[in-house]
């Protein structure tokens, strides 16, 4: 059953430059897709288009359709802002790259997490703080009390990204856009957060659009990928066939660098074991 | 539909620079001309008193019968002089302090930057009053105090930019390869910060004229016969009812100068950093 | 002594910096005012005065003793708040300043408060409605406003509202002061309007760019991705985040407003601190100049202290004047 259809999506800059060029893909309920490419490949803009959060100076054409709870197709690009507010959160939401600026720097984590929780679950007062604690536990934060009472700058990068994930999950969305969710984290934490995302998406039967410049990371969490370069799809298919037989020269390069990184990581872990 | 957008942005960018340059250039030329030639001598009282504008006196005359066009031109010279020399003092002092602070280690850097933080809040006009009291009333006093005010702004900016550049890899590489600090300043720091500093200083050029005018208006600027726009306005206050033009001409000149300088600075900023257009 | 609470510790350190800068600034101010060309007693003397007259004048000024003892005399004047005696009127500078504050303080604070309100509304409108006609109009007006000298605005207002149409007085303040309340208010309307017009323009520019910064921020995007409306997101997150950087600017702009008041008092012939200072400078009345400039310095430093404290309270990330200054 299809949940998301992206058809001929193009995005133009204010000066008319083509930033995303005719991208097509679709996603079934509970399935996952990866968007891979370097910065400037248009992968983040594609993610923002699905959320209807493109900067107002950019212009998008084509269609991005999401099926809502009552099985109606909604075109994000043409729907009004107020209708989009109903879709965002409950149907589709996102986890962004850098959790520090993505959280309000002057609001304590607990209050921030309480905002989507009380809105989507319609609860107030004591119930909310219980729900906040539960949400923090569900993303495997071991000291929910301390984290809830902290400002974002007072907790670790891994904890911040877990909080961002908890905020996204609070709305119980059918589709999650994860835009480089682990890039700003160090390797060990990266693996933990990736495992957490994998587990949660699996358990809740959510669909996932995973955006990354790193094929090695993408291959651990999705089965199907779209390789983007300068706004164009240069290759798509399963991760397996891409890794074993990349057709496009750019994909070949990506695969080679992913292998190098993997080898490097493996060897560094071995060193760690020896010590 | 997308192509004209590009053009309009480009056109706009040039427009600000061009309009700003024309306005500022016009005022500079008017001021410089007044050194060699003005329609009448600025202290020539041969005209009728408070004459309205006519062919022989385009802007009319003041209460002593002096030609207002000549005096307004001469006021342009004062504004340009103050702007130029105050900015010069501000640049030399500010760059020196800023670069030193940028290189300074934690404690001394803290001391310099908190001093600058306090000084920045101290209004230039009060500083100018202090200098005028200490040195006596003169154009030089005005220039020195306004220059010091500008130097504080330049110093803060320079310190910040210097720190940023010293933290980059190429500055580290230069240090490791044994390049002397003075060479680093001239090879890496100044070439990388001059455009940001230029934009800031360009803005100050107009504000310097404004500050001098306030001082002269209060009667604390250059003493007569020097005709600053501020002192022209002060003289015009008592006759504004009968001769509004005597208050409008110098005031408007001042506004036009500041707007011209702002346009120029904005144009420069966009030129150097096209991304900032959206701000 | 150890102070536990981090904010209290910050206040304590910041207050120490305040005191330290006062201790440094006081002698600097003193020395700067002593390096005058010529002898301040000249102002008191007729041309061709005899040596006895000169000595008497120096004695009455207190300049016949060493600089060090002059400095300590001044410190004594400072701590007793008398600030010495005016050379011209021979009245205590301290009590004269107190009298003048009755005009200057209301003028500064009322104008500043109104200017902030005007700027908040217009800066917000410019940031959000940059494409509408009123957004553009406000934008252009505020850009024009920062280029206008405050005394010229005053002159034009006098021309329009006092000379052409006799709505408000062209200057002066009732001799009974605030006891003649209606006339006191009336005489402050144009001066306040003058300052508001100029100050709100520059404040509008700051509010606009602070608002735009927040609008561009990632946390607003996060909030919207969770289904909150733009307006709701802004109410919830933007105000506090935009307020913190605005406060340090407001502190500086308050001093600017004070200077604006000094100039405007001259335009409208108001008997305030500004008129007293300007007259003092042109009459070489040292104790007056010294006293007012010292008080202004103290004022600027205290405003800076309160601004830093408020900012730190609003934004716990800031750690100036304690371990690891940011930026």
Image: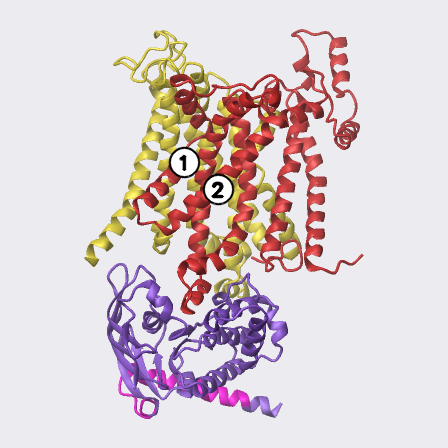
Q: Is residue B73 left or right of residue C274?
A: left
The answer to whether residue B131 is visible is no
Q: Is residue A28 left or right of residue C44?
A: left
- Indicate the quadrant where residue A53 lies: bottom left
Quarter of the C terminus of chain A within the rendering? bottom right
Q: Colour of chain B?
A: yellow
Above-or-below relation of C259 to C214: above
Q: Residue at x 67, y 6 (%)?
A: C48
Q: Which secondary structure lies at badge 1?
A: helix
Q: Residue B254, labelled with which disc?
A: none
Q: Which residue is mark 2?
A: C117
Task: Write down the chain letter for disc 2.
Answer: C
Q: Residue at x 53, y 40 (%)?
A: C253
Q: Which residues are magenta?
A: A241-269
Do dots 2 and 1 share one subunit? yes
Q: Is residue B14 left or right of residue C213?
A: left
Q: Main secondary structure of the magenta part?
A: helix
Q: Residues within 10 Å of mark 1 (few under 14, many from 20)?
A: many
């Amino acid at each position: 059953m299809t949940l998301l259809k992206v058809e001929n999506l193009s995005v133009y800059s204010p000066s008319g430059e083509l930033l995303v060029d005719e991208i097509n893909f679709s996603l079934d309920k509970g399935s996952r897709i990866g968007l891979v490419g370097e910065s400037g490949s248009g992968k983040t803009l594609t993610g923002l288009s699905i959320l209807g959060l493109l900067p107002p100076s950019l212009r998008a054409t084509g269609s991005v359709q999401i099926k809502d709870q009552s099985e109606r197709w909604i075109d994000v690009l043409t729907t009004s802002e107020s209708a989009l507010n109903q879709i965002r959160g409950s149907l589709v939401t996102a986890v962004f790259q850098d959790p520090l600026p993505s959280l309000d720097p002057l609001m304590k984590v607990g209050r921030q997490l309480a905002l989507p929780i009380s809105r989507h679950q319609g609860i107030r007062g004591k119930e909310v703080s219980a729900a906040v604690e539960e949400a923090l536990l569900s993303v495997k934060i071991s000291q929910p009390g301390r984290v809830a009472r902290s400002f974002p700058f007072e907790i670790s990068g891994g904890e911040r990204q877990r909080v961002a994930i908890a905020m996204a999950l609070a709305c119980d969305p059918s589709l999650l856009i994860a835009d480089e969710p682990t890039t700003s984290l160090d390797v060990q934490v990266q693996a933990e957060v990736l495992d957490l995302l994998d587990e949660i998406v699996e358990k809740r039967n959510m669909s996932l659009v995973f955006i990354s410049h790193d094929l090695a990371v993408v291959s651990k969490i999705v089965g199907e990928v779209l390789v983007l370069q300068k706004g164009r799809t240069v290759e798509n298919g399963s991760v397996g066939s891409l890794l074993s037989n990349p057709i496009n020269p750019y994909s070949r390069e990506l695969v080679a660098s992913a292998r190098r990184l993997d080898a490097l990581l493996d060897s560094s872990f071995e060193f760690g074991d020896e010590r | 539909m997308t192509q004209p957008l590009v053009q309009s942005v480009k056109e706009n960018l040039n427009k600000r620079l061009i309009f700003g340059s024309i306005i500022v250039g016009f005022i500079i030329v008017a001021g410089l001309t007044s050194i060699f030639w003005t329609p009448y001598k600025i202290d020539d009282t041969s005209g009728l008193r408070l004459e309205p504008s006519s062919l022989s006196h385009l802007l009319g005359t003041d209460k002593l019968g002096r030609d207002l066009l000549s005096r307004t031109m001469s006021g342009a010279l004062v504004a340009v002089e103050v702007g130029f020399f105050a900015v010069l003092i501000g640049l030399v002092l500010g760059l020196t302090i800023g670069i030193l602070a940028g290189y300074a280690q934690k404690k001394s850097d803290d001391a310099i930057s908190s001093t600058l933080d306090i000084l920045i809040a101290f209004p230039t006009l009060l500083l100018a009053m202090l200098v005028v009291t200490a040195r006596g009333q003169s154009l030089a006093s005005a220039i020195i105090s306004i220059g010091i005010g500008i130097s504080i702004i330049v110093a803060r900016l320079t310190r910040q930019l210097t720190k940023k550049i010293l933290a980059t890899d190429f500055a580290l590489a230069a240090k490791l390869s044994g390049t002397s600090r003075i060479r680093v300043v001239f090879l890496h720091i100044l070439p990388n910060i001059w455009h940001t500093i230029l934009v800031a200083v360009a803005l100050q050029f107009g504000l310097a004229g404004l500050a001098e005018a306030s001082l002269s208006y209060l009667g604390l600027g250059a003493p007569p016969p020097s005709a600053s726009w501020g002192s022209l306005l002060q003289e015009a206050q008592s006759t504004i009812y009968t001769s509004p033009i005597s208050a409008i001409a110098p005031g408007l000149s001042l506004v036009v100068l500041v707007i011209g300088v702002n346009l120029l600075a904005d144009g420069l900023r966009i030129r150097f950093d096209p991304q900032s257009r959206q701000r | 002594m150890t102070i536990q609470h981090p904010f209290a510790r910050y206040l304590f350190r910041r207050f120490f910096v305040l005191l330290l800068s006062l201790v440094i600034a006081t002698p600097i101010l003193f020395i700067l005012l002593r390096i005058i060309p010529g002898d301040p007693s000249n102002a008191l003397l007729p041309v061709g005065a005899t040596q006895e007259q000169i000595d008497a004048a120096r004695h009455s000024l207190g300049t016949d003793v060493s600089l060090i003892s002059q400095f300590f005399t001044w410190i004594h004047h400072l701590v007793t708040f008398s600030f010495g005696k005016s050379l011209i009127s021979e009245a205590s500078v301290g009590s004269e300043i107190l009298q003048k504050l009755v005009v200057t303080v209301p003028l500064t604070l009322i104008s500043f408060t109104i200017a902030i309100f005007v700027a908040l509304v217009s800066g917000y409108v410019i940031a959000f409605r940059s494409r509408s006609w009123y957004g553009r109009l406000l934008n252009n007006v505020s850009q024009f406003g920062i280029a206008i000298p405050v005394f010229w605005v005053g002159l034009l207002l006098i021309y329009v509202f006092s000379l052409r149409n006799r709505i408000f007085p062209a200057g002066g303040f009732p001799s009974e002061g605030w006891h003649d309340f209606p006339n006191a208010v009336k005489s402050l309307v144009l001066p306040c309007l003058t300052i508001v017009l100029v100050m709100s323009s520059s404040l509008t520019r700051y509010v606009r760019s602070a608002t735009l910064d927040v609008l561009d921020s990632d946390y607003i995007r996060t909030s919207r991705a969770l289904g909150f409306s733009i307006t709701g997101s802004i109410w919830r997150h933007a105000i506090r985040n935009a307020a913190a950087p605005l406060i340090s600017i407001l502190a500086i702009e308050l001093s600017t407003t004070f200077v604006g008041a000094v100039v405007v008092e001259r335009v409208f012939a108001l008997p305030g601190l500004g008129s007293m200072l300007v007259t003092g400078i042109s009459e070489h009345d040292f104790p007056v100049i010294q006293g007012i400039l010292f008080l202004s310095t103290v004022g600027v430093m205290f405003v800076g202290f309160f601004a830093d404290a408020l900012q730190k309270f609003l934004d716990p990330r800031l750690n100036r004047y304690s371990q690891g200054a940011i930026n």
